[in-house]
Amino acid sequence: MLAYWIPGGTRTLPANASHRIGIGVFVMNEKREVLVVQENTGRFRGTGVWKFPTGVVNEGGDLCTAAVREVKEETAWMPFEEYAAQPFVQTNELSNCIVDICKAKEDRKYSGFVPVPTSSLFSYEKNYMYFNTRDFGGR
């Protein structure tokens, strides 16, 4: 990543030129309905596919703020089983995996990954291991 601009010229590199952070939001209510959206633009426009709200974190933005913003944009409630039964979800490996994880989480059979701070002989920077702490004695 370019970190230093040679003096004497106009800086034309935007602050977030190295990458964009995408987010997806899973929200389920007490009736086991999930919050879904149909896209008005993009790849799934006009396909009838219902999907979880997704978007991009604005430059310098906060992940939680971006998640709330995406949830507020054109969403509707749908029974989780109906969402999971969509042909698109059934035939898309990533979407199907996300459904399995969300169902396991709702049924309290999955606790997710937790960032655990670690140190390393290979770097002076803070490192994080992401894993299910329940399976490792609650480290």
Image: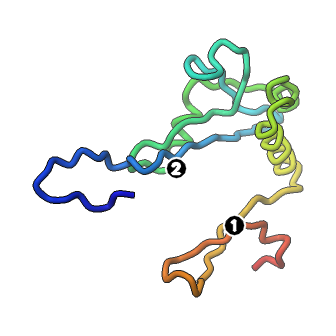
Left or right: residue 58 compared with residue 105: left
Q: Nearer the viewer, mark 1 or mark 2?
A: 1
Q: Residue at x 81, y 38 (%)?
A: 93
Q: Quadrant of residue 88?
A: top right
Q: Quadrant of the N terminus?
A: bottom left
Which residue type carries mark 2? Leu
- Between 58 and 76, the residue placed more toward the observer is 58
Q: Residue furthest bottom?
A: 121
Q: Residue furthest top?
A: 46
User: Residue 102's x, y, as percent?
Assistant: 80, 45
Q: Which mark is residue 130?
A: 1
Who comes first in sequence, dot 1 or dot 2? 2
For residue 34, above or below residue 15: above
For residue 18, above or below residue 121: above
Q: Which mark is residue 115?
A: none
Q: Residues within 10 Å of mark 1 (few under 14, many from 20)?
A: few
User: Residue 86's x, y, as percent?
Assistant: 84, 24
Is disc 1 placed on a helix, strand or loop? strand
- Between 135 and 120, the residue placed more toward the observer is 120
Cα separation, mark 1 vs mark 2, equals 18 Å
Q: Quadrant of residue 103?
A: top right
Q: Residue at x 56, y 43 (%)?
A: 22
Is disc 2 placed on a helix, strand or loop? helix
Which residue type carries mark 1? Tyr
Q: Are marks 1 and 2 in contact (CB under 8 Å)?
A: no
For residue 27, above or below residue 40: below
Q: Residue at x 74, y 67 (%)?
A: 131
Residue picked out by circle 2: 63
Q: Residue at x 55, y 40 (%)?
A: 68
